[in-house]
Image (spheres, coloured by chain):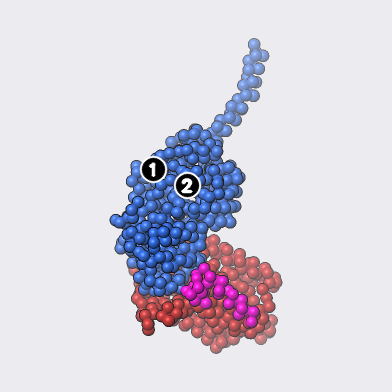
Amino acid sequence: MQQLLQQLINGITIGSFYALVALGYTMVYGVLKLINFAHGDLFMWGAYIGLTGLSLLATLLGGGGPVSIFPVAVIVMVTIALIGVLIERIAYRPLRSAGRLAPVISALGAAFILESLARNIYGASWKTYPTGLVPAGRVALLGGVRISIMQVLVLAVSFLLMALLYLFVYRTRIGTAMRAVSLDHEVSRLMGIDVDRIIATVFLIGPGLGGLAGMIVALYYGSFDFTLGWIFGLKAFISAILGGIGNIPGAMLGGMILGIIETLGAGYVSPQWKDVIAYVILILILIFRPTGLLGERVAEKL
Amino acid sequence: MLRKVLLLALAAVLVLPLFAGCKPKEAAPIKIGVELPLTGDYAYEGQGMLKSIQLLVDQTNEAGGLLGRKIELVVEDDAGDAGQASQVAQKLVDAGVIAVIGAYNSSATEPASVIYNQAGILHITPSSTATRLTEKGFQRFFRVCFLDDRQGLFAAKFMKEVLGAQKIGILHDNSTYAQGLAEHTKRYAEQLGMNVAFYDAINPADKDFTPTLTRIGGAGLDAIYFTGYHAQGGLLLKQSADLGLKLQWVMGNACNNPELIQIAGVENAAGTYVTTEPLPKDVNVPEAKKYVEDFKARYGEEPASVWWMMAAEAFNVIRYAIEQTKSTDPKVLAEFLHQAKNINGITGPILGWDEKGDRLGTIHVAYVISDKGEFILNPQQPSP
């Protein structure tokens, strides 16, 4: 029982990372019907920009400490958001009327470019975040189950961000415009919505959140390299599909479910079988709910 | 008379270019291939190994080369990937190398070795220790490192004799190397009467191993032996401390790397044992001391892992074979190495190789990570 609770906590932590990254996939898909394969690598770049920011601040202020996380987090979000908008401008917008496949290839190209840039600029070796930024203590919950302060913070921040995003999309004018654009570009334009601007906004928010997730993951695990975006990007993409792509609560749900299934598979069967177990369950879910758990429309593209 | 002089002059003009043509041909460099992971997960090792080889090659060339010819390195990056290894192996063959040093990991060495064997090239791996690499009957394949088999025996004896463990766990990462070492360790541990109560593998592409660790934590083990690589080793140490588990970790020689401690954090790595060949600075032969000094003088850092030294050793062996045989024919060199005995190696005396190309003897030791985050030779070692 104690082990089961511990495994659930492990799974929710992993799942919250998948969910945070999945938000970026699902938002872009919602408005553009495009799988933004560069998203995983924008997430990875968040980890690197965060590292640069923290080291800079540490040399400038000498130490920095936990407080330095906040300004650096803002820098990371802004930088990655700008890179996201830039990619949309250069690689996606010119191809918007070019059919389905061209933007997908363009997105894959952007992903490879981002990954190679990270490797060439930062080098191929593993990078480590400074330790001691977050107190290392652990809280013992009932029955000897442990949750670290870091885990509590990660979960709190993740849920807060997801809730804020949900409120933004469903309760603000820009959010309403986004949902309108996701239904139909032409009609939205007739209604006086600046579609290009809404899409640019999506490319600010999605990558911004993704970049922040990259920094949180790097803070949590302490080390990473330039391949970080690949596995998290893939798992997050699957989470988005599982939850119903284009659907924000779906991305959160999909991430959590994938994280928990993987963890239980690794913890109770074998880590070698966890992917088999996880994906058999996912295929079953998709057979019975082809649009994903919370998806409404059939994903008719790609 | 004038006619004779003219004829002679004409003859000279015609013949001279022939001699001129001979000279660069004689001085054509000896091409030696290097196949290492210069990018990807193992790039840190690959880069350091390349530096080591470059150091020795430059020293050799400054001293006049070999057989009056310069050494030219042809370097290819396999990224530690089996698919890429086959491609770059073919490139090295096409470049006309007589010998290849590489690859780093067994998964990359295995497909490449088939290609080098077909091309008849001398192939020496500095660091791939999977047993089955030398089971294919390749006559020109050698290693300067030692087999996983020996390390498995050493690790089992260490856990039993030094740690007094009865119930142990073994964790690998499904790579050719790690799985091989895990299987040998399991076999020897059971022969020594220990109970292998946990035996499984992680997926090294993952970042989060808490599900597996939680399960290991519940198994009540005296010691857990991880046979994978340092990037995952570091994460395992960090996350097992985060979970509050009190596990006695022992790790294989792919974790013999300062990055392990950097990734884990010093406080989480302290007390972990690592079974491995000795660090460069702990090898007690003059050749090793000279290598460490020269490396420091050139690069301003100490050679950080034994694999860097093994890469230098691989070149040293090729150089020795060329010097002794006065030949650059891979067949002659390979036959020579099969007969060779007691070479003064950089990594200690090389007793020779068996008919499969495996280096004889062993030099494994156990290190322990100190509270300051250093690998220090553990005072207690198992019986030889």
Q: Residue furthest top?
A: B1
User: Does residue A55 appear to the left or right of B7 in the view shown?
Assistant: left
Q: Residues within 10 Å of mark 2 (few under 14, many from 20)?
A: many
Which residue occupies the foreground of this view, B34 or B202?
A: B202
- Circle number at residue B367: none
Tell me residue B311's x, y (percent): 45, 48
Residues in magenta? A261-288
Residue drawn at the location 44% of the way across and 42% of the way down: B352
Chain letter behind tag 2: B
Counting every numbered tag in the picture gives 2
User: Does residue A209 appear to the left or right of B234 in the view shown?
Assistant: right
Q: Which amino acid is tagged 1? A: Pro
Q: Quadrant of residue B193?
A: bottom left
Q: Which residue is mark 2?
A: B358
Tell me residue A136's x, y (percent): 35, 74
- Circle number at residue B349: 1
Tell me residue B334's x, y (percent): 52, 40
User: Does residue A116 appear to the left or right of B239 in the view shown?
Assistant: right
Chain letter behind tag 1: B
- Against A280, residue B91 (above or below) is above
Tell me which secondary structure the magenta stretch mostly adopts: helix
Q: Is residue A286 magenta?
A: yes
Chain B's colour is blue
Element at badge 2?
Answer: loop
Callouts 2 and 1 close, C-beta under 8 Å: no
Q: Which amino acid is tagged 2? A: Asp
Q: How far apart are labels 2 and 1 at the CA level? A: 14 Å
- Against A54, residue B102 (above or below) is above
Q: Is residue B136 magenta?
A: no
Chain A's colour is red
Which residue occupies the foreground of this view, A107 or B228?
A: B228
